[in-house]
Amino acid sequence: MKKKLLAMLLTGVMALSLGACSQNSETEADSGSGNSAAEDTSGDSESEGSSSAGEEVELTVFAAASLTETLTEISELYAKEAPDVKLVFNFDSSGTLKTQIQEGAACDLFISAGQKQMDQMDASADPSVNTEGLDFVLEDSRIDILENKVTLCVSESSKIQLTSFDDMAAALKEGTILLGMGNSDVPVGQYTQKILEYYGLSEEELNERGLISYGSNVKEVTTQIKEGAVNCGVIYCTDAYSDGLTVTDEATAEMCGQVIYPAAVLKTGEHPEEAQAFLDFLQTDPCMEIFEKVGFTRIEQEA
């Protein structure tokens, strides 16, 4: 009897031991399965990281209004060159763009129609121009990219015969025409001021006599000429070409200096590498052909 009872007790202990072993094995199996799941999740995370690297970058470009048509055409080429980069343009007078940047507007690349507006934001420029000590231009990124020409265009509806800047100056002295020109903070307006000074004409006096109609950028002046709101206007040859206007005369360097377009990547931009890549692309032959087609001239870079 005692032997039977001892056998039964031994059998029960063995059963309990086997159950515990089985349970431990299942736990280990579950634990191993959990590690595999964690590894799979980690793999998914890496996969997601690599896909995010190809996400679209929105590159903001502030450019002088006279570049509207050319840069719009070039953007179609760049879409093939860099499909992950979306170009967002803000076209206006260089003075207005400079003010927007200074006030905090997001901008990766700035292309000005005049050196003055770029100098005003460049810490390396002469303090007499950069009077506020602004430091927006990324070092070594600034480059003179294009040259334009200042021209005189006469409205088709004008009854006054004008064939040159000499004729324009004479008519202004006589008070027989209305001249369209850019505001004082607009590069084309500043070039016009120099032309007036060249002829010994006072802009203030002409304005008081009602002989000047101002535009906030070169496109507004171009529209005034095209619509016959003025007898004539001073605009760039590129804008005359884009709007189908006939150039009457071209200003010499002696009259207003060279019209140089500088470009630079800005320190405040979010995508400096992409901005530099687009700036480099603008200097390639296909882009220069588009610029030259409307009247811009390539500026050869020193080796």
Image (cartoon, helix red, strand yellow):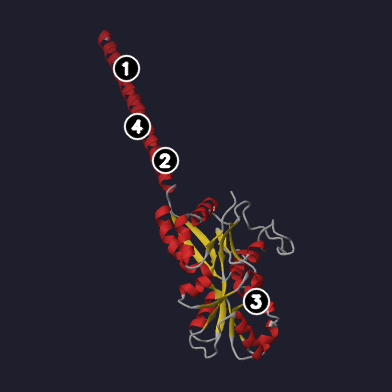
Mark nearer the N terminus (1 vs 3): 1
Specify whether 208 is left or right of 227.
Answer: right
Mark 4–mark 1 Cα distance, whole angstroms, equals: 30 Å
- Locate residue 231, reporting x and y percent: 55, 86
Mark 1 lies on residue: 13
Q: How many other residues sit within 10 Å of disc 3, few (<14), some (14-19) or many (≥20)?
A: many
Mark nearer the N terminus (3 vs 2): 2
Of the residues shown, which amino acid type is indicated by label 4? Ser
Q: How many other residues sit within 10 Å of disc 2, few (<14), some (14-19) or many (≥20)?
A: few
Mark nearer the N terminus (4 vs 1): 1
Of the residues shown, which amino acid type is indicated by label 2? Glu
State which mark lies toward you, 4 or 2: 2
Mark 4 lies on residue: 33
Mark 2 lies on residue: 46
- Locate residue 247, reporting x and y percent: 52, 77
Specify whether 233 is left or right of 24.
Answer: right
State which mark lies toward you, 1 or 2: 2
Q: Which mark is residue 195?
A: 3
Q: Quadrant of residue 28?
A: top left
Task: Tell me what residue is drawn at x 63 percent, y 69 percent.
Answer: 253
Mark 1–mark 3 Cα distance, whole angstroms, equals: 111 Å
Can residue 4 be seen here?
yes
Of the residues shown, which amino acid type is indicated by label 1? Val
Mark 3–mark 2 Cα distance, whole angstroms, equals: 63 Å
Q: Is residue 148 above or below residue 284?
A: below
State which mark lies toward you, 4 or 3: 3
**Mark 4 and mark 1 residues within 8 Å of each other at the beta carbon:** no
Can residue 107 be seen here?
no
